Amino acid sequence: MSDGWKISGAVSRERASAALDRQAEDEGWDPDIVLSAHEIAEPRPEEWMIEAWLPRRPTAADKRAINALFEDDPPTFTVEKLPPTDWVTRSQQGIEPIRAGRFHVHTPDHAPDPGAVNLAIPASQAFGTGQHATTAGCLAMLDLMKREGLVVRNHADIGTGTGLLAFAAMQLWPRALATASDIDPVCLDVILTNARSNAIPLGEGPGQLMPTIADGMGDPLLRARGPYDLLIANILAGPLIALAPEFAAATAPGGHVVLAGLLETQEAEVRAAYRRQGMRLARRLVRGDWSILWLRNSRTR
């Protein structure tokens, strides 16, 4: 046990996400500094708290490194000394487990739920742990699709991040072909690590996950493995609208798409973009200010 320290500051969701991306891309980042982020309050989904946990008193160099994640406009940080404790465990205690449908998403320090499908994601990957309403909403929607009898033989998670939603789909349809893609090269190692820790088989065949780094659906691997019975995309409204033609083309006739990352106020525009591509609403969920959409490809051939 040793003294721990925490540096924290309030930022927007967009800036928190950008800071985590910069930290992940920094090959010289001090591994003693553990960075995480979480919503401050559900009614205000754009307000986030970013936290850096250290096993020592922060040095001037530590503070400069954290400030640099925000380029020329760092937030106002507070520095707090923590009581003697296992500071790594303490850094993960703010990420409480999430129960969504049959799924229990937790950090490795939390015990699994024997009555649920458990998925463990490290706290430092806070945007993929299910904490955010969109991720939990996607899990609930996938669970609903399974309960309503949907049969999936080939699915893909686009913008997968940690791999969480791809892992969840594999638990629901264990013999399906499974693909997970992200535009960020850093995500590949993250997906592989999380797959190993969750006993997710990797490979090209049924019941195995094929991860890839891809910008949109034009990637040769994504094209070769389609068309898909199910596409999952928890990204943002703008990219969802831009990708509507590609998603529709990659979805099999009668296939399904789950969309998230859009505010309820953005839902009409997103739905209109997909309606123009022959996609019809099957179900919708709302979590806080966020919409999760289940759309069905109305094409028959």
Image: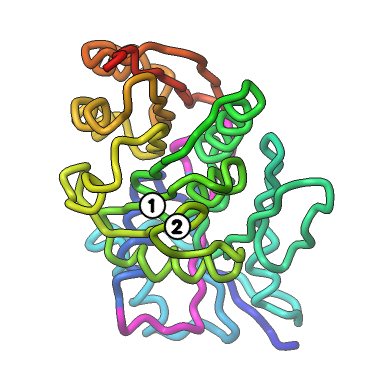
**Label 1 or label 2, whichever comes before in sequence order:** 1
Looking at the image, residue 254 lies above or below residue 70: above
Q: Nearer the viewer, residue 89 or 240?
A: 240
Residue at 56% across / 52% down in the picture?
129
Q: Which of the image's four quarters has the N terminus?
A: bottom right
Amino acid carrying label 2: it is Leu
Residue at 38% across / 52% down in the picture?
180
Please identify the residue farthest to the right as the structure is shown: 114
Query: Is residue 169 found left or right of 184 in the rendered image?
Result: right
Q: Residues within 10 Å of mark 1 (few under 14, many from 20)?
A: many
**Percent position (x, y) of residue 165?**
50, 46
Residue at 55% across / 70% down in the picture?
196
Q: Which of the image's four quarters has the C terminus?
A: top left
Looking at the image, residue 13 lies above or below residue 209: above
Secondary structure beneath label 1: strand
> Circle 2 is placed at which residue position?
209
Query: Is residue 180 found left or right of 290 in the rendered image?
Result: left
**Percent position (x, y) of residue 61?**
37, 84
**Percent position (x, y) of residue 55?**
60, 84
Q: Nearer the viewer, residue 222 or 46?
A: 222
Q: Nearer the viewer, residue 226 or 96?
A: 226
Amino acid carrying label 1: it is Ala
Query: Is residue 177 found left or right of 270 in the rendered image?
Result: right
Magenta residue span: 27-47
Cα gap from disc 1 to disc 2, whole angstroms: 7 Å
Residue at 28% across / 11% down in the picture?
275
> Circle 1 is placed at which residue position?
180
